Image: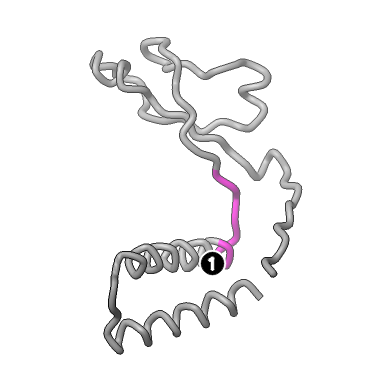
Amino acid sequence: MAKKEKWVKIADADVRHIWVKDGRCVADGCKGKKSVSLPPTFYQDSGTPLCSSCDLDLEYSHTEVKASDADRKLAVAVEAFHDINAYFDKIDEFTDAERKIVRIVSKALKAIKA
């Protein structure tokens, strides 16, 4: 049985949303910043952010959460595991070395998630 996901409340001060220029802004030779980091309340208070140079709408890119060094290392490890998993999903037959890598990485991931 799969583990149930747990949602955790995070303070707005520990979250930021990244907005980026769209293709039109870049194509027009705009000199404004390529991306901006804004608090989560910006959108509800002011709507879609605009490029500071040409006033075109920016596009939402992603959300970032403030994390400790240990959290960042864990995130990098989990992302690496997903990359390895994607690589092995494309292989029909494994060598002995590849099977050993899969066992080691799987064991490490189980330890991280515990």
Q: Where is residue 90 in the image (x, y as percent from the top left)?
A: 30, 65
Q: In this view, does 19 lie to the left or right of 23?
A: right
Q: In this view, does 6 lie to the left or right of 88?
A: right
Q: What residue type is labelled 1?
A: Leu
Taking depth in this image into account, of 52 and 3 the one nearest to the observer is 3
Q: In this view, does 114 lie to the left or right of 51?
A: right
Q: Where is residue 86 in the image (x, y as percent from the top left)?
A: 37, 63
Magenta stretch: residue 70 in it?
Answer: yes
Figure check: 112 above or below 64: below
Give the quadrant of the N terminus. bottom right
Figure check: 82 above or below 13: below
Task: Identify the residue at image location x=49%, y=78%.
Answer: 106
Q: In which quarter of the image is residue 67?
A: bottom right
Task: Identify the residue at image location x=42%, y=10%.
Answer: 55
Task: Identify the residue at image location x=28%, y=78%.
Answer: 93
Magenta stretch: residue 85 in it?
Answer: no
Taking depth in this image into account, of 34 and 88 the one nearest to the observer is 88
The residue segment tinted magenta is 64-71
**Residue that carries the numbered disc 1 in the rendered image:** 74
Task: Identify the residue at image location x=55%, y=44%.
Answer: 64
Figure check: 75 above or below 107: above
Figure check: 16 above or below 7: above
